[in-house]
Image: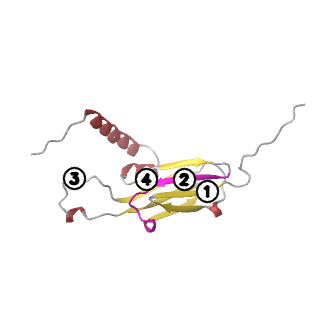
Amino acid sequence: MAFARWTPGRSIFSLKDDLDRLFNDLAGTESERHEARSDVNPRINLEESDHSFIVSAELPGVSKNDVRITFQKNMLIISGEKTGKDIKSAAYLRYECAYGKFYRSIEIPGDVNSDKVSADFENGILTVTIPKSSETRSREIEIKIK
């Protein structure tokens, strides 16, 4: 019989994650509840530059053909499916990999040029560049004091 080392800290963090998921399921919008239910959802970063918003999403093990990206009303939606082996067809001793459908939505805070949105997918990282409209680009002007 093999023994597994018990780490008390890991158990507490797991409990915290479970409670966070529970409360996220009870509160929030429908899309937020859907996002909280999936273990496959990608982690997302949103950064802002002078000319654009850049969204990066971690999608390891996902083919670019299995990803759908839409942009509507300043909402970027990344959805798709991470497929894997049929877990019933193998005799796993441990199974931690998550497979299934995912859905993430993120609101872009500002006026953008939605006709120029572009995406790149390389090494499991999806990068979506959303150019700002020319009116929202910050510019510096000097103001004379009277």
Distance between the alpha carbons at the discs numbered 1 and 3: 41 Å
Q: Is residue 67 magenta?
A: no
Q: Which of the 4 image quarters holds residue 90?
A: bottom left
Count the marks: how many? 4
Give the answer, above or below, for where 94 lies relative to 68: above
**Sequence order check, earlier mark of 4 and 2:** 4
Distance between the alpha carbons at the discs numbered 2 and 1: 8 Å
Assess whether mark 1 and mark 4 are in contact (beta carbons under 8 angstroms): no
Q: Which residues are the magenta region?
A: 51-65
Q: Which mark is residue 55?
A: 2
Q: Quadrant of the C terminus?
A: top right
Assess whether mark 3 and mark 1 are in contact (beta carbons under 8 angstroms): no
Label 4, secondary structure: give it: loop
Distance between the alpha carbons at the discs numbered 4 and 1: 19 Å
Assess whether mark 1 and mark 2 are in contact (beta carbons under 8 angstroms): yes
**Sequence order check, earlier mark of 2 and 1:** 2
Give the answer, above or below, for where 45 lies relative to 127: above
Distance between the alpha carbons at the discs numbered 4 and 2: 12 Å
Pinpoint residue 10: horizontal percent, then vertical percent.
29, 37
Most distant residue in the bottom direction? 65
Crowding at label 3, few (<14), some or many (≥20) Cα neighbours within 10 Å? Answer: few
* Closer to us: 15 or 131: 131
Which residue lies under the disc numbered 4? 42
**Sequence order check, earlier mark of 4 and 3:** 4
Label 2, secondary structure: give it: strand
